[in-house]
Amino acid sequence: MTDIVLNKDKQLSTIGLLIAMASIVMLFGTFVSSFYVLKIRLISGLYLPNSIIHIGWFNTFILLGTSISFTFAGKKYRQNNTNGFDLLMTVTITGGLFFILGQFYLWSELTRVGFPITSGQ
């Protein structure tokens, strides 16, 4: 019994460490991308159409919604409520897919108005 608990604790520690490392990588990725955005703004006046701003806000709300549904899915999992867990995980995964599609659409729109991914480099 003790071996099972130790293995579970080791697995949880590994998962926690991976999540922490991914969060740190995303944080520094945000810093780097913010630097390039500020660099672009210094080079030229940045004007984006309202449609692009709305796409960004829509993606933000999708990301917040999937974070909330993932949190509640974890609670359902701890309560052994498999139906609720399955439903909330489906909502989370579907929202994640919509977020990725929204990001592709956002970048295509940015490229269309003259801001490709490589601008400012």
Image (cartoon, grey):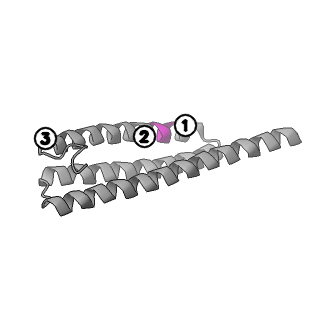
Quarter the N terminus occupies: top right
Residue 112 badge = 3
Q: Residue at x 18, y 45 (%)?
A: 110
Q: Are marks 3 and 2 in contact (CB under 8 Å)?
A: no
SS state under label 3? helix
Q: Is residue 52 left or right of residue 28?
A: left
Q: Residue at x 39, y 40 (%)?
A: 96
Query: Can residue 89 be found in the magenta stretch?
Result: yes
SS state under label 2? helix
Q: Which amino acid does label 1 sit on?
A: Asn
**Is 12 in front, or is 27?**
27
Query: Can residue 117 be found in the magenta stretch?
Result: no
Q: Which of marks 1 and 2 is in front?
A: 2
Q: What residue type is labelled 3?
A: Arg
Label 1 environment density (alpha carbons within 10 Å; few <14, some 14–19, many ≥20): few
Q: Residue at x 61, y 43 (%)?
A: 77
Q: What stretch is highlighted in magenta?
A: 86-90
On the image, numbered disc 1 is attached to which residue? 83
Res 79 visible: no
Q: Going from the N terminus, do you reach mark 3 or mark 2 first? A: 2
Distance in Å between CA atoms under marks 3 and 1: 43 Å
On the image, numbered disc 2 is attached to which residue? 91
Q: What residue type is labelled 2?
A: Val
